[in-house]
Image (tube, rainbow, N blue to C red):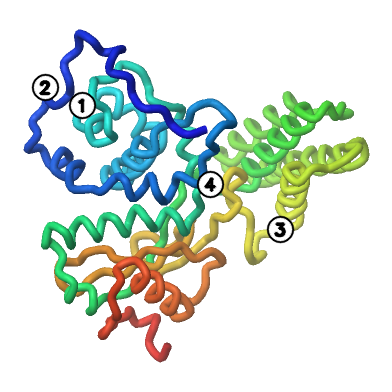
Amino acid sequence: MQPKNQEDSLYLFQAQLEQIIDLKHPLCKLSDAINWSVFVTEFGPYYSETQGRPAKPIRLMVGLHYLKYAFNESDETVVERFLENPYWQYFCGFKYFEHELPLDPTTLVKWRKRVGAEKMEVLLKETIEVAKRNKILKKGACERVNVDTTVQEKAIAFPTDSGLYHKMRVKLVSAARGRDIKLRQSYTRRGKRALVKQSRYRHANQHKRANREVKRLKTYLGRVVRDIRRKAASIDPELNDLLVMADRLLAQERHSKNKLYSIHASEVECISKGKTHKRYEFGCKVGLVSTSRGNWIVGIKAFHGNPYDGHTLKESLEQTERISSVSLKHVHADKGYRGH
């Protein structure tokens, strides 16, 4: 349902944020410079007019994402810091100081999935438009750009076979209980005991015993997978994705390609960018386009599957021309792009 406006009658005897903060603060100036109506126009069609409960304000959702990436926060910490920072609340469109969390952090995840990656480009486009309107970024500066790729790391634990087997089994058992599938055995206590013993054996350099516990965890996972397939009357898409992920995990070996490194983020890949201090990074390859003058980011795009750098150049430049509304005249690419 469409968001509802804030009612001033609920804050009859409270001072407005404008009266207690410094309006010369950078966040206040940026808040006044952004055209927030653009986001209402772009994201409004994703909300129903009549069905469901009233949604959170679009400015709140967009503002929290701006603050999250500007201050390098997670979904949980950006909501927590919002509660204690009046400048953040003013930036997100609130007139009065709030004493309660504005939303659950998972709401940000659901909102990103709803609008999709292409619509999230609107946030970057408006940032560039604000710089142009204030004459901070000139139009000619966007015609000469630098292109490079990097790795956007995911917040995951270092992947180990024992931990992946255990987490996958726990997730499948939880999914089976939610669908009233009575398993022969869940291996909850045995699996936890085997995981602890494997960690202790590995710490003591008793590798044969540790490998034995890893094999036991793998066996428990395989039994749960087969038991669910036997007893499930119908397999819905969500459960099918979990079973496919479990089969992929059971089949992979040490030197297999396209390994599964995380249960909650199956798109994570192992990428080597030739860094001396960090040989391998776990995440997603990202293409960055920046202006030669001023180093403004005018394009950023995620590329799944760890493609060759030269194959990402065309899509990165197309996105930049679409967002900045200019025709690129000169491109300086990293050595991985030469010849493309």
Residue type at the position of mark 3: Gln
How packed mark 2 is, by other alpha carbons closer than 10 Å (few <14, some 14-19, many 20 or more), is few
Element under disc 1:
helix
**Mark 1 and 4 residues: CB-CB less than 8 Å, in contact?**
no
Q: CA distance from mark 4 to mark 2?
A: 36 Å
Disc nearer the start of the sequence (2/1): 2
Residue type at the position of mark 4: Lys
Nearest the camera: 294 or 190?
294
In the image, residue 303 sits, relative to residue 146, either above or below, namely above
Q: CA distance from mark 2 to mark 1?
A: 9 Å
Q: Give the residue at mark 3.
A: 252
How packed mark 4 is, by other alpha carbons closer than 10 Å (few <14, some 14-19, many 20 or more), is few
For residue 313, what is the image quadrant?
A: bottom left
For residue 336, what is the image quadrant?
A: bottom left
Question: 38 left or right of 311?
Answer: left
Q: Residue furthest front?
A: 50
Residue type at the position of mark 2: Ile
